[in-house]
């Protein structure tokens, strides 16, 4: 029973590392032998086994084939990746609360600007049980609470670029969507908030993989946070942050001006008001 309890408390990354070591030892191979057979560096394989790093998906696919484990390692990797994302997202939220300047790009309506009804609609897509419905309500409350940073004193300087896609993919409730569009217009009237729309006419761009947030703290330090496919990356390397800032600046240059963006949103809002 004690071993079972320990396994239940084990992190996803630790479980993956333990499985990798178990499979290697069961096969009677040393790290050097496994490295020679798989062409992965010995020190890299060691770091995976002791949970010092998380590999790319392709590595787990290779090792699944090598051991003939039928996708077991891939499944353990997916659990570990979700945990890593949650940890990084918690740190991002901590930094977001203290940020003095925020530059955000999103493919959808950003959480900071969502109304309660739209937040609930977007968060409840996968709910099936009563417990999951309760969790959605907790997430909605947390998201709305997060928005309070826009109203603190002093408020952070916030610039949000939304892909036109965000405005063209409404929730099913037309009234709720009209309220969401009106809310965007109202939020853009705050002196600390700037909203811009990136129109379809600009074509493909280099941030289509997912949202990007750039945060500057009071001491001038900056971080980037990228999201996509249920994973996220907190970037602190300043050279990488600078590259993301240049990418963001290029999108800002081809987006509609703040005034034209609000006029654009007003035009869409007319479609949902009687």
Image (cartoon, grey):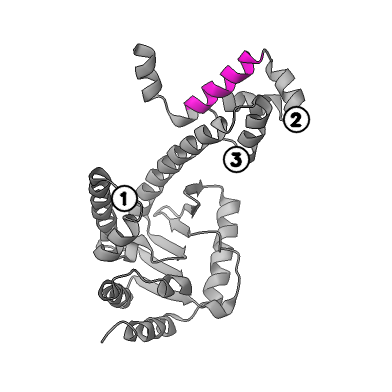
Q: Is residue 199 left or right of residue 31?
A: left
Q: Which mark is residue 39?
A: 2
Q: Quadrant of residue 261?
A: bottom left
Q: What residue sits right under mark 3 in the picture?
A: 57
**Residue at horizontal 56%, vertical 31%?**
73
Q: Position of residue 136 (x, y in %)?
A: 27, 51
Q: Does 133 sit above or below residue 181?
A: above
Badge 3: few (under 14), some or many (20 or more) residues near its Cα, within 10 Å?
A: some
Name the element at disc 3. Answer: helix
Quadrant holding the N terminus: top left
Badge 1: few (under 14), some or many (20 or more) residues near its Cα, within 10 Å?
A: few
Q: Earlier in the sequence, mark 2 or mark 1?
A: 2
Q: Is residue 41 left or right of residue 168?
A: right
Assess whether residue 15 is covered by the magenta stretch: yes
| Residue bounds of the magenta highlight | 14-27
Q: Quadrant of residue 29?
A: top right
**Residue at horizontal 63%, vertical 18%?**
24
């Amino acid at each position: 029973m004690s071993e079972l309890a320990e396994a239940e408390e084990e992190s996803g990354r630790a479980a993956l590392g333990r499985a990798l070591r178990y499979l290697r030892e069961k096969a009677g191979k040393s790290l050097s032998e496994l490295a020679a057979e798989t062409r992965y560096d010995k020190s890299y394989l060691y770091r995976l086994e002791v949970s010092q790093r998380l590999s790319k998906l392709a590595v787990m696919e290779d090792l699944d084939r090598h051991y003939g484990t039928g996708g077991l390692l891939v499944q353990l990797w997916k659990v570990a990746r979700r945990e890593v994302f949650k940890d990084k997202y918690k740190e991002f939220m901590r930094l977001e609360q203290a940020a003095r300047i925020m530059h955000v790009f999103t493919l959808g309506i950003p959480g900071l600007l969502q109304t309660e009804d739209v937040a609930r609609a977007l968060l409840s897509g996968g709910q099936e049980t009563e417990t999951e419905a309760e969790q959605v309500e907790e997430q909605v409350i947390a998201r709305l609470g997060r928005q309070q940073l826009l109203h603190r004193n002093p408020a952070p300087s916030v610039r949000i670029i939304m892909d036109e896609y965000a405005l063209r993919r409404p929730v099913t409730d037309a009234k709720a969507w009209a309220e969401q569009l009106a809310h965007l217009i109202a939020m853009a009237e705050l002196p600390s908030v700037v909203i811009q729309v990136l129109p379809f006419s600009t074509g493909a761009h280099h941030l289509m993989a997912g949202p990007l947030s750039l945060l500057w703290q009071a001491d001038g330090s900056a971080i980037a946070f990228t999201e996509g496919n249920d994973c996220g990356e907190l970037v602190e390397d300043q050279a990488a942050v600078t590259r993301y800032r240049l990418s963001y600046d290029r999108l800002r240059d081809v987006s509609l001006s703040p005034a034209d963006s609000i006029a654009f949103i007003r035009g869409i809002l007319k479609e949902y008001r009687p």
